[in-house]
Image (cartoon, helix red, strand yellow):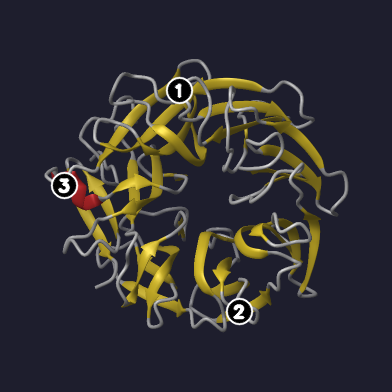
Amino acid sequence: MSRLLGAMRPTVGFLATEAILAILFSSPTPALAVDGTHPNGAVICEGGAPYYGSGAFYGVTSTGGANNLGVVYKIATDVSHTETILHAFTGADGSNPTGMLAGPPNVAGVSTLYGVTSNGGAHSDGTIYKISTSGTFTTLYSFSGVDGIHPTSVIWDGADALYGTCSAGGTASSGTIFRFSLSTSTLTVLRSLSSADGTNPSSNLFLDGTTLYGAAPNGGSGYGTVFSIGTGGTAFTVLHSFNSTAGANPACRLIKQVGTTTTLLGTTKSGGTNNTGTIFSINENGSGFTQLATFGAGGASNLTGVNPVDGFSTYTTGSGGGTTYWGLTSGGGTGNGGVLYAFTIANGIQGMVYFTSNTTNSFYAMGYSPVGPPAIFPTIVGGPLFYMVSNYYGGTSNNNNGVLFAWVGNQPDMYHTFGL
């Protein structure tokens, strides 16, 4: 059977018929709940993203829980869809967790996940934490201002280091890039960002060898930058400073273009021909910047979507089928609620799934305005498996606190409604 997980219209364009799409939906005004509310950041999946298997989804909500400060949750992928709250934040150990957890448990022998909270901790400026897949929780570090405020994400190098960014704080109050050593519990500020560097980073860094690559949505020439820095903190370089014409406000995780060794792909939230965002490529040394596509095309309904969010993920088909880059926009589409889009270098952007903000549409209860990058895994049926987060509404009880559900055929298969 063809399986699609998510809140979508039946129109799926050239989306592989044997695909699975999972979506998290959240609310801008979550209510106090023992369960979490407002899921924030893409989920990861134990066991390589099984469906109706023995694995589990892991993620965070920025609010809800016993103290209304957010939770780390686990949801079984079997037919029970049982949720376990692994940790409810208290404020002292952090509050308002954000971003995708790092250190996915489908890596052999790994049972520890890493994450950040944007607030709370010893100085109320955010924390780094670790948590086992069974729920053992430890606060690793509390930010204090000069080392950064409001951490936004971390990545794990597979060994001893976590790398991440803070959207504020540092010597210029414009954000920081940091490394945290797991063996010594030491945080090193690799760079306190200045206006010329780019400011307020909000997405995952990309690690290639001993160099980190990232994007800052502000600063530079006024419209954000793409930058690189060595893992030891040396050789910080502004690779590109945006000017709005070819894109503005790159709040995205960069990825390597498949089939290349030094070319990165990313998105901007605005700028470009329609001032609704772009897709760009750039070489790791800063050369060859190219605007590949612009959003907002397709008439009044903007069928490609507008304002892409946090980059994209890849899915490469077999037998020479090529690579498709999948992403999300926060607006546009036939329902003006955002779009799951597919992008290829040869064919540009195609809107695939359209979310809706129309309260009379049955899809409205499943949310609109997606805000997280799709996380993609292969499945046993040969297609891609997507996980996404959306900013508004969802839930079988219309409590607007979020839902994790599967799309099977033409009907949603609810996994969990948050906030109940």
Q: Which circle's residue, 2 or 1, is located before the other in the chain?
A: 2
3D distance between C-alphas at marks 3 and 1: 27 Å
Q: Secondary structure at mark 3?
A: loop
Q: Which circle's residue, 2 or 3, is located before the other in the chain?
A: 2
Q: Which mark is residue 121?
A: 2
In the depicted structure, whether residue 274 falls above or below residue 385: above
Q: Position of residue 331 (x, y in %)?
A: 36, 37
Q: Give the residue at the far top of this rendering.
A: 346
Q: Which mark is residue 359?
A: 3
Q: Which of 108/367 is in front?
A: 367
| Residue type (three-letter) at the residue carrying disc 3 | Thr
| Residue type (three-letter) at the residue carrying disc 1 | Asn
Residue identified by numbered label 1:
274
| Residue type (three-letter) at the residue carrying disc 2 | Gly
In the depicted structure, whether residue 419 falls above or below residue 257: below
Q: Is residue 58 left or right of residue 408?
A: right
Q: Residues within 10 Å of mark 2 (few under 14, many from 20)?
A: many
